[in-house]
Image: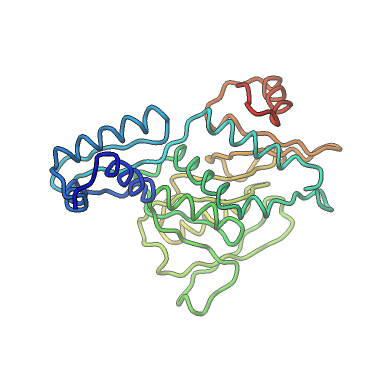
Amino acid sequence: MKFKRTERIGAIVKILSDNPNKIYTLSYFTEKFNAAKSTISEDLLVVKNVFEKLQLGKVITISGAAGGVKYIPKTSKEENNSFLMELCEKISSNDRILSGRFLYLIDLIYDPTVVAKVGKIFASNIDYSEADYVVTMETKGIPMALMTSKAMNLPLVIIRKDIKVSEGPTLSMTYVTGDNSKVQSMSLPRKAVKPGSKVILIDDFMRGGGTIKGMTQLMTEFGAEVIGTGVFITTSTPTEKLVDDYISLIEIDTEGNEINVKPNLKTFNYEYREDEIEEVMEHADEDEIDE
């Protein structure tokens, strides 16, 4: 069966975007579309140019016998800015404040559209070129960690709070929460992470950094190295966290009578002043956000 050029390009975009960071050989496309390699190369060039112009990510070609083409998810600063501003507007709603000054976030954390975008942002801002796994702590961090692992094309490893008999021999350890209020435990099957591996840690929320520090220590016990850490939401206090090298997307200030939510623009090397951030947030409900 022969395909028109528009049909081939549409299919190529679908295949690459559904399988980020996976290498497809030219032979794969030539056989699939019954077309010559020169024809497929021209199609890929069109796809590559469109993705770059619209900042939809990068399509790169890999030379050599084992080479081919793959799609790397990338988000622009403007796109991140708009998305995070919209999220902050939703989180700032008064009806999300629970007793004890907690915020209701379950609907956002389990929203496929939100966590898919969060995963792409993490993949765009964390160097995972040498990583072997994405690691998270159950349970609320699982959705965004799964989307991050998909964007990075890496297997996901989930640290449990309790030992699962079905997972075989397990390594368990205790850790102290960031505010030193209590001691908790975490466990991971011994076969989950190979010694000498490099991992990316993903978590949904961080106050003092106790959980992330515990995860880092657990990886050390497995002989693995943490080369990147991404957190969805962090609190402004305590200012001194138990971990240093991480990126966070949103910062919450719970001091005082109000709960202030703002994007952590420093993560993306934005050079905004505080008054500029406040001005953008005031107009976040308009159709377009003026950068």
* Image coordinates for residue 214, horizontal then vertical, percent: 57, 56
Residue drawn at 41 percent across, 55 percent down: 133
The residue sitting at 55% across, 48% down in the picture is 113
Residue that sits furthest to the right in the current view: 257
Classify residue 104 as left or right of residue 109.
right
Residue closest to the eye, 127 or 3: 3
Q: Is residue 86 above or below residue 20?
A: above
Residue 44 located left or right of residue 252: left
Q: Residue furthest bottom?
A: 165
Residue 9: image location, x then y, percent? 29, 41
**Number of marks in the rendered image:** 0
Using the image, determine if residue 63 lies above or below residue 180.
above
Q: Give x and y (percent) for residue 171.
A: 49, 69
Up the image or down, 98 lies above or below 123; here it is: below
Which residue occupies the foreground of this view, 64 or 183? Answer: 64
Quadrant of the image containing the C terminus: top right
Along the line of sight, which residue is nearer the eye, 149 or 202? 149
The residue lying toward the viewer, choosing from 17 and 125, is 17
- Colour scheme shown: rainbow
Residue that appears at 37% across and 53% down:
132
Q: Position of residue 19 (x, y in %)?
A: 36, 51
* Quadrant of res 182: bottom right
